[in-house]
Image (cartoon, grey):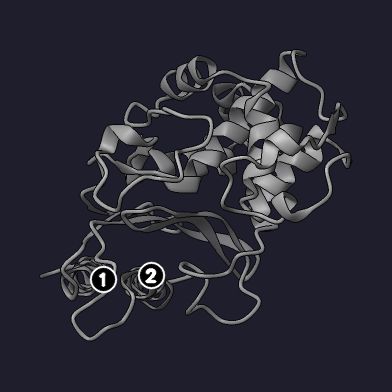
Amino acid sequence: MTDTTTIENTAVAERLNVVCDAHPFVTRFAIRNLVTGETFERGADEETPSASTRKTSIMMAALKAVRDGRLDLDERITYEARFAEEVASGMFRYLTPGIVISLRDAITGMMVLSDNVCTKMVFERLTLEEVNAYCQAIGMSGTHHRFLIPPLALSPDHALKSVTTTTARDQMLLLEWILDAQTSAAAAERLGVTPELAAYALQTLKNQILRYAIPSRLPFGTVVAHKGGTGKRGRMNAGIVYRDGKPFYIIAAFTDAVPQEMADGTPGYTLSLETIGRLSRICWDGFHA
């Protein structure tokens, strides 16, 4: 006799793959049902451009430095004109230099609006070597930070090593560890932070302003702690979805080799974001709360 749960999981897996197979671009994902522990994967260990999903690990590396006493969330940072050079995201680039904010606020800007002026403020207090070492130490073996800010002139078919790369599994696991660190001192220690700093990280992810991809097909007001990304080769999003006040599932989805324009004239990025939204909705409907 076939177990009902097995049938349901098979149906969910089939629906996820049908959505991915509907378009000519690559879609990779790692999904964890937080109620049952079941994991669904497609190319989860394949290297893929991270775009701004990389910023979650930058945030955690900065928070480790705060825990270690090397950085202070209350440090004052002055917005200088140089921070706006070669920046194509966020609002700070349009503001008047001279504004002073805290490191805490810079992390907030980096995460909730993906502001790359704020990213520069944060990353300049770290090093590429430090962030890469942090990722390797906590188990994100497929993640490689290569630039403070990726070059603006990248072509849509750029090489992987031209940008920071990651894997869907790495991003799913990082979110799971942040979630676990809310209640587990051992999980917080793995990330090199205190439970309080882990709680700050999770709340910052929940504060995300940009609501495309994962939340786009979910009921209005659904809590999603997530970070998205806009790359030359595709769109990506990784987040924790809540239901009835509890963590429901984690989804890390990355599209790649997305055409600038589909055969019917639709911009490729439109369908890449829609694909991620559909994957999320399948989980919402197919998993039991």
Q: Is residue 56 left or right of 120 when viewed as pictured? A: left
Q: Quadrant of residue 61?
A: top right
How many numbered marks appear?
Answer: 2
Q: Which mark is residue 27?
A: none
> For mark 2, does the 10 Å Cα neighbourhood hold few (<14), some (14 to 19), or many (20 or more) residues?
many
Q: Is residue 248 left or right of 92 when viewed as pictured? A: left
> For mark 1, does the 10 Å Cα neighbourhood hold few (<14), some (14 to 19), or many (20 or more) residues?
some
Q: Which mark is residue 283?
A: 2
Q: Position of residue 169 (x, y in %)?
A: 34, 42
Q: Position of residue 86 (x, y in %)?
A: 56, 42
* Residue type highlighted by circle 1: Val
Q: Which mark is residue 12?
A: 1
Q: Is residue 201 visible?
A: no
Marks 2 and 1, how far apart at CA: 7 Å
Q: Position of residue 288 (x, y in %)?
A: 42, 71
Dot placed on the residue nearer the N-terminal end, 2 or 1: 1
Q: Quadrant of residue 34?
A: bottom left
Q: Are marks 2 and 1 in contact (CB under 8 Å)?
A: yes
Image quarter of the N terminus: bottom left
